[in-house]
Amino acid sequence: MLDTMTFTKVLGAVCGSLLVFLLGSWAAESLYAIHAGGHGDHAEQAYVIETGAAEDTEVAAEEGPSFEELYAAADAAAGEKVFGKCKACHKLDGSNGTGPYLNGVVDRAKASIAGFGYSDTLLAMAADTWTPANLYAFLQNPKGYAPGTKMSFAGLPKAEDRANVIAYLASVN
């Protein structure tokens, strides 16, 4: 028996369900929306990988030994352990992940991996190479070294860790 009262109740239930869905959608959008510039080439990363230290890296660099001293004493085995932080985005097997592959990166031209979408800043540096000193500066503060880089990693705060990672990467060339 389908009378007008039953039809009205069904129509009201459908409209009410749609209203609840619409309000829930608006609430979820306001809670979880990323307002970082939209999609496509201009999208910003939604997260930053923390390294566990929030010390001032400039002060640490002034107090410690020079890069040449650190690199001469660097331990590739210790660098392999520190590289564990990089494995989430970078590979050493010649294939790209979220970031470009890093085997052979030491003394390789910047932004030289074919098919990888580098930021405009790194593309502008393509004539330069990733010397150990350049890698050291980049790993200290990626966004400071190459403003606009797509790499969301905050950097390695310990100078010894940076030198060890570079020694490890040089050993897997």
Image (tube, rainbow, N blue to C red):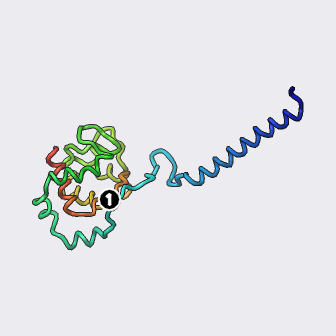
Is residue 131 something that shows in the picture? no
Q: Where is residue 125 in the image (x, y as percent from the top left)?
A: 29, 52
Q: Residue at x 28, y 68 (%)?
A: 57
Amino acid carrying label 1: it is: Thr
With 156 as the anchor, is 171 left or right in this view?
left
Q: How crowded is mark 1: few (under 14 residues within 10 Å), some or many (20 or more)?
A: few
Task: Looking at the picture, tell me which residue is in the foreground, 47 or 151.
Answer: 47
In which quarter of the view is residue 90 placed?
top left
Name the residue nearer the viewer: 98 or 105: 98
Q: In the picture, residue 116 is in which quadrant?
A: top left
Look at 32% across and 51% down and name the residue there: 122
In the displayed orientation, state which residue is furthest to the left: 72
Residue at image x 39%, y 56%?
Answer: 48
Where 7 falls versus 102 (above or below)?
Answer: above
Q: Which residue is drawn at 21% across and 63% down?
A: 159
Left or right of 93 on screen, residue 75: left
| 17 or 43, nearer to the observer | 17
Q: Which percent across, then down, holds residue 150?
A: 38, 51
Quadrant of the image containing the C terminus = top left
User: In which quarter of the view is residue 72 placed?
Assistant: bottom left
**Element under disc 1:** loop
Label 1: which residue? 51
Q: Which residue lies furthest to the right in this view?
A: 4
- Looking at the image, how many numbered discs can be counted on the residues? 1
- Specify the quadrant that holds the N terminus: top right
The correct choice, above or below, for 7 with respect to 154 in the image is above
Q: Can residue 30 be seen in this view?
A: yes
Above or below, 114 against 52 in this view is above
Q: Name the residue at the front extreme.
A: 1
